[in-house]
Amino acid sequence: MHRLSLLLLSLATLGTAVATAQPSFTGPVPVPPADARPDVLRRDYLARVTETLDWYQSAITSEKPLTREQILVKLIRKQGDAQVSQRVLELMAEPQSGDMFWMFPWTAVAFAGRDQLSPEARAAIRDAWRTYFPMRGDTENHWAMYYASLYLMSELYPNEPGTSWFTGKSSAENLAESREYLIHWLDISTTIGQGEFNPTHYIGEYAIPMIYLAAWAQDPAMRQRGQMKLDWLMADLAANTLNGVLRGPNARTDDTSVIERWNALSSYFSWQMFGNTPPPSGYGGWGIYFAILADQYELPEVIRRIAVDRGSDFVQRDLKRSRRRWRYSDVEMAPIYKTNYLRRDYAVGSYQGGLSDPIQAHVWDVTWAVPDPRGKHTTMFSAHPLSSAQVMQTYFTELPDAMIDGLASQGKPSYDVPDKILGSSPYEQVFQDLDTVIALYAIPEGVRFPHINGYFSRDLVNVTEDKSGWIFAQGGNAYLAYRPLAGYEWQHLLGYRQLPSQGGGYRWERVDHGDKGDKLLFSPHRHNGTIVQAASASEFASFDAFRAAINALPLTFSLEPVPTVTLKTLRGKQVTFTYGQAPVVDGQPIDYSKWKLFEGPHLNAEKGSSILTITHGKLQRTLDFNTLTITDQINE
Amino acid sequence: MKPTSRLLALLALAVLPALNAGCATAGHDLYLFGAVNIQGRVAGSRDASLNGVYRRQADGSFQHIGINYPAMLTGSFDPRDPRVFYVATINGVLFTRDGGQTWRIGTSWDMTEPKDVRVDPNAPDTIYAALPDGLGVSTDRGLTWTRRENGLPARGKYTQVVTVDRTRVGRVLAGCETGIYLTEDAAQSWRAVHPTKETVNDLQQSPHDPKFWLAATQSAGVLASRDGGLTWAPVAGLATEKAHYNIAFDPTNPQRIAIGGWTYGLLTSEDGGATWTARNDGLPAKHRVWRTAIDPDNGHLYAAVVYDSLYVSADFGRTWQSAGLPNSRISGFAFVPKAQP
């Protein structure tokens, strides 16, 4: 063996050993290797897989029964001994619950253990698919888990009658229905845009079913679909992360991740795929369900490079779509026009405003890079704290009153609180050009919470309220200017602390961190607006120079009859944005109807095409869902 | 489920007062559709409680039957055979032909979250499902389903309730987001008979006068029709600010009607709907009535108070007693004629 190879092998082994001793979520921030040789990258990738599996396996003790995750790790490592089978039998003897979150883990156990578990253990799992009736759920991520699992189990147990399945349908019927739905979902997500786009946590609920299909489906076409959609998801992740941290708009996030942007399951995927950020604690919880098969996925180098290369600024525009609207809307799924501008020191992202998803959406932000994102609140934005029973009914098939009342106990504590910073609103319209964001608000009378909340992180420095009306601040190496268009006051932004459940779902208390905590810019005006302008510190001689440059920008605005702003941006663009009208840049109105599914230096796809071209430098991969082909090429 | 766990679950349900015990010898079985232990429940919750269909027992308690499934809404029975019934669930329309021992999801992935399901009593092979994006029909006892939406608007056809006119085969009223729609040809075509700005939550036909219908709405109060659903007018004396959820006629007394809702609790009329009285004394302070029903055998009034219990009144709401099912959400009642021996 070559001496260098031996050295690399030794380092890899050492790295694994170190990782076992100190998991990466508490270890140093990983740095992508300067040496981008495929074998080095693959070695590191597999070391991360090993670390995750080791972490779960190292927690196995003789005193505690095996968890489902530990069972999986043992099976995937071909250690499916009698103890594992016995534990499966014990778990299967308990009442089952968890719906689609039950389906995919047990699908994994069934497949990983098909040649190791005892006949009794395999039969117990199989019979649970007759006796336990999981809910299909009401979101696309639920359905991805449900139908991918049902598809695979129907393939694993073909030719069995409806009486042997909870659905009452035969293996062939289950397989046909699952296949039809999965292909339908792939069709719409690759033609009119991803629903539940760029989710900080739900990325796992899509990526895990896809890798299961890619690895375990018997039908080569379905395997290929799983592989290709996984590429698609990872490419979308790569283009939306700053040093591995998913930022910018999200269809779904939560009260923690919207401000501590790193702290999300998406960071597990960045860590596993790109090695450029620490994983969240415990690998995000669900990470293990991806890790068990991650060694069977080959991350395309072109995607990795998109994730780790922030040497050149780039703008990426995407078309996504809202969650399905059942009622009180003229459209079934609203188009979401996303803009992302990524630079080395910060990134700016937005969509055009309005409702995307009813809860947990995030519309826009400026997020800055920091050496270690753990525990840091690295973002700035404003939002209207919408709370509306009719909006909930638009997206959910529920009676009008119970949903808002029940959300806090269902793990969404902020939906109906006035200092909410999470969520989209029909009364917010946003325009972004590079690193300028203008958010305008026109809240009708009678709307609950008729005010705007601006988020000011505890991690900002040099926060300065200028007599010009701008508020200046610095986050990392980003200079930030925030201009509220109406009067405001400062409040402490209270945090949420989860309390032990007393049998009635989630319980929370609010926590005041005092002057050292985050701040809320509370602006109690229905017609309102926010302008944010960002720049790299390296672009200016000093913070004062940045302030002077911002103050010199020509700016006019008014709030009546509707908010309108005319601004010359720091980048020299003349922007006019009036609530209810198309934004105008240098005299040209923005026509969103012409936007493509993806458009930018890295990701490109025509609307309706089902073909995504992924590009970085000379590397290019094309995913064609029409022909189920993957084409790699090197552009000269 | 382990036998001990199932026994405990049954004991938890069996807390009915003596009030109900006398019902067992009457002419109907009572089936409930819903879930217990609902506070904080979301898709994926871990939970060992028994949910879905409950049937009243001889001692007045409720026994869970069939599959354990927490998102069952309403059920409808084949009048020819009470072992055959259909349930609206989040997975679609489920049906059983053996009294709940075995089930099949009749619908496929393209029909989800039906809010209501009804058998045509005059053509019981035909089943109607109220869908959040329209209306589905099966003509083969639930095995296959097709959409029949001709005449419903492209947008605005969210359908919360579907009710079959018992006097004429294929005559059906649908309560939608944009109003009340009528078909007289088994859903081959629909026409709007009354517009609303928000969802129609319930439609009920009087058991005494088939021309008399009531509709509970989200923001138009309660509507009445005296011509079989062709024309509708607001019922006087009922608020319109908040939603009314559902309506129950008393089969034993044509003058008695009940309305349930989250905000107003339980409202009753004892003069055929001319005047209304809140009957919330004795219900929990948060008298959020998710569903009300009236026993056709004895006129007992039920109020399913969500996140709380099932309550029953023998004096039409003047006094209430808990009927068990704590921390529950009961979405559907079905009184089914007992099978003849």
Image (tube, coloured by chain):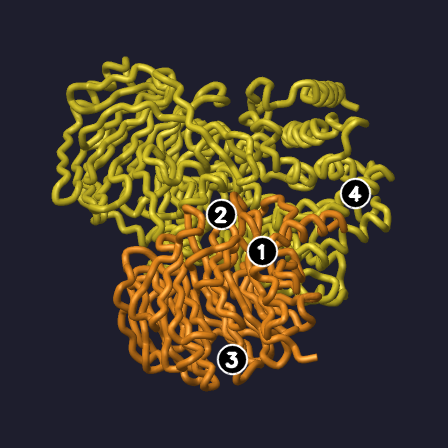
Chain colours: A yellow, B orange
Where residue A589 appears, as percent x and y from the top left, is: 22, 48
Specify few, some or many for label 2: CA neighbours under 10 Å numbering under 14, 14-19, or 20 or more: many
Using the rendered image, report if marks 2 and 3 lie on a common chain: no
Which residue bears the numbered disc 2? A613
Q: Is residue B95 left or right of residue B240?
A: right
Residue at 51% over, 54% down: B321
> What element does badge 1 sit on?
loop
Using the rendered image, report if marks 3 and 1 lie on a common chain: yes
> What element does badge 3 sit on?
loop
Specify few, some or many for label 3: CA neighbours under 10 Å numbering under 14, 14-19, or 20 or more: many
Dot 3 or dot 1, earlier in sequence:
1
Which residue bears the numbered disc 1? B17
Q: Kindly identify which numbered label has been placed on residue A90.
A: 4
> What element does badge 2 sit on?
strand
Q: Amino acid at mark 1?
A: Pro
Measured Cα–Cα span from mark 2 to mark 4: 48 Å
Measured Cα–Cα span from mark 1 to mark 2: 68 Å
Q: Chain of mark 1?
A: B
Q: Amino acid at mark 3?
A: Asp
Q: Chain of mark 2?
A: A
